[in-house]
Amino acid sequence: MSHIAIRVDASQAIGTGHVSRMHVLASMLQGSGHQVTLVCRDLPGNLIAVSQEQGLTVAVLPAPKNLLSNTDWLGVSQWQDAEETTACVANQPVDLMVVDHYALDARWEQSIHTHLGCPVMVVDDLANRPHDCAFLLDQNPWPDLTTRYASQLLNSQARCLLGPDYALLRPVFAALHQSPPPREDKVIAFFSGTDPTGESRKLVDAVKHLAHEQKRESLPFSLLIVTGQRNPDRDVLCKAPVPDGVRVVEALSDFDAHMARARYAFGAAGVTAIERSCLGVPSTLVCVAENQHAMAEYLAGQPGYQYLGRGEHTRWQDYASALQHLAANWHQLPTLPAITDGKGAERVVAALEHHLCN
């Protein structure tokens, strides 16, 4: 049995996506008999308690004395973070360190390798900083995957696991991909766990406007809006009255099943875009974080996608127009080709186990 440590954070500034995909990897590794320790810093909006509730072991790094800005995702220097991370897991040997953090690069990775004597696996999708690692995972469907991580960004010995074939999706997505449920006249909307640009609120305003202006015509579909548990507007949105056929909830225990039954979706261009593709659900995309912009623009040129643009620029009027267009074309929706079968986490674990056993 190997001991695998995972350095990852969630916060109000970072969002929840990094920790969510590391939950998938950690659970898959534990299911294969490995010991896993998440290493997370005590930041505002963290998911440490959620990780522990899921049965994962968490080593907590101390809260920083001060966060300089919303872009100060680490709160300390890379040197201090590497030192504190090493101390957190030094009570037993570490066979592999996984790091999923935009604020860490080759300097941190080299320090970890030196002090813990273990290989490092990097999870990234920005390709904007150097890495020194044994593995690099980028699960996004970039058009330039083969050249995205140029030699100056990555050591030549690193094994690259690139593209949606390695997407860290929960096992339920593979099952739903293989045996999809019947579709319903339903649209589902989810704009990440934090919804930093207020897309849920804009969509609610749009359906209220349409209901007021088009009293004699109803949309040919129901609309389910999932706000996300870290959405600052969630309480107001979930309690406010909405038109018939519209439901607003904070979270769903069977969110994936609802997504699989939907015929269309509105959502961010992050990991949920890969999930929707796995289930064959066409969608209208919005970029709610800077790291999503390139992928959103790429997917916008593919069949089955519409793109509203960056969230800081979208308005409720844009959603009203998108809903009207969707209603007018409801019975001629495009088919969305699946870009993954949902078994990416299995492939990642198999690659790591092969490396650890040889």
Image (cartoon, grey):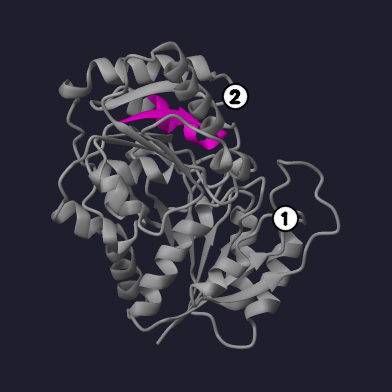
Of the residues shown, which amino acid type is indicated by label 1? Answer: Pro
Position of 132 compared to 71: left or right?
Answer: left
Kindly indicate whether the residue at mark 2 contacts the one at mark 1 (C-beta within 8 angstroms): no
Quadrant placement of the C terminus? bottom left
Position in image of residue 234 (x %, y %): 59, 44
Q: Nearer the viewer, residue 255 or 64?
A: 255
Position in image of residue 152 (x %, y %): 51, 43
Residue annotated with mark 1: 44
Position of 53 compared to 66: left or right?
Answer: left
Residue at screen point 25% across, 27% down: 304
Residue 108, located in which quarter of the rendered image?
bottom right
Residue at screen point 32% across, 53% down: 256
Q: Nearer the viewer, residue 290 or 282?
A: 282
Of the residues shown, which amino acid type is indicated by label 2? Answer: Glu
Q: Nearer the viewer, residue 81 or 21?
A: 21
Magenta-span inclusion, residue 296: yes
Q: Residues within 10 Å of mark 1 (few under 14, many from 20)?
A: few
Quadrant placement of the N terminus? bottom left
**Mark pair 1, 2: CA separation:** 23 Å
Above or below for 57 versus 261: below
Q: Which residues are magenta?
A: 283-297
Q: Is residue 145 among what the camera can see?
A: yes
Q: Residues within 10 Å of mark 2 (few under 14, many from 20)?
A: some
